[in-house]
Amino acid sequence: MYPYRLLSLAAVLLLAGCAGPGIYLPPVEDRSAPLSRAPQAAPVEQDTGVRVTPLYDEPVVRQQRLGSDSGFSVQPLYPSGSNDRTSDYSNPQQGQLQGQLQENTQYGSGQSSFQGSSEAPVSANPAVVALLDSARQQQGAGSLAAAQTSLERAQRIAPRDPQVYYQLADIQRQMQKYSEAEQLALRGVALAGGQSDTLRKLWLLIASVRKDTGNLAGARDALEQARRY
């Protein structure tokens, strides 16, 4: 019986110990205030000992201003206001060709045939002669469009008259329609067989047209053709 009493006493003591307050209390955490995060330290890069050198050095551009005392001057490549088509050719050749054209385009009245001479048209048709005279007067007054209209009427009346083609080509040249002017003059050459004076004027006109377009070699060839008459 005695051992059973000891066991009963031990059980009572154990239960009493579990029911009483413990010696160690758990910590109480205050959740009423928000928790602030502690700042994290920035990661520290470790020096690996490797250095990267660029393959090419970056060029350094320094702007310099040239003052009046710098001793440098900038000259334009081409003179201002120069719109001549033949400015890229040498002046001696151009001047020589211009002189030859002026020498060969003087007629009895002292005027260039390209500006309208006093020579009467060679056409035998009175209507064509009247239209050519009217075109000369309109051309002299600067009415190139009216002169062109008169010459086109004369061309419809006499489509094989070289004088009509000569004057019409001259009008086209003054209107800077150089391709049309040369074609009309060459057509007049084809129709002016045996008319030395007309052939000479046509070839001189062709030389002038080619000079205006910068074709100096072609202009010299046309000038040689004009000297044959």
Image (cartoon, rainbow, N blue to C red):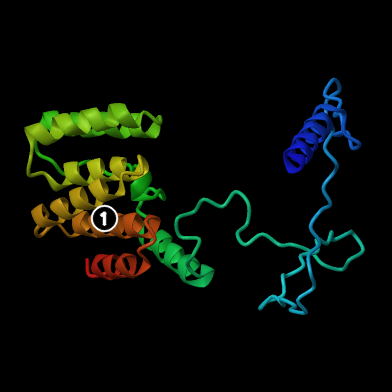
Q: On the image, which quarter does residue 43 sit in?
A: bottom right
Q: Position of residue 220 (x, y in %)?
A: 33, 69
Q: Quadrant of the C terminus?
A: bottom left
Residue that numbered label 1 is attached to: 201
User: Horizontally, is 96 left or right of 2 in the view?
Assistant: left
Q: Residue furthest front?
A: 1
Q: On the image, which quarter does residue 205 sit in?
A: bottom left
At a point 35% along the width and 54% down the height, the residue shown is 107
User: Horizontally, is 181 left or right of 186 in the view?
Assistant: right
Q: Position of residue 104 (x, y in %)?
A: 36, 62
User: Horizontally, is 106 left or right of 80 in the view?
Assistant: left
The residue nearer to you, when weighing 77 against 113, is 77
Q: Residues within 10 Å of mark 1 (few under 14, many from 20)?
A: many
Secondary structure category for the residue under label 1: helix
Q: Quadrant of the N terminus?
A: top right
Q: Position of residue 189 (x, y in %)?
A: 15, 56
The residue nearer to you, when weighing 76 against 185, is 76
Q: Residue furthest top?
A: 32
User: Horizontally, is 216 left or right of 74 in the view?
Assistant: left
The residue nearer to you, when weighing 67 against 44, is 44
**Number of on-image labels:** 1
Amino acid type at mark 1:
Lys
Q: Position of residue 185 (x, y in %)?
A: 21, 51
At a point 35% along the width and 52% down the height, the residue shown is 108
Task: Reply above or below: 181 against 140.
Answer: below
Q: Can the viewer see residue 137 in this picture? A: no
Q: Can the viewer see residue 9 in this picture? A: yes
Task: Reply above or below: 182 against 228.
Answer: above
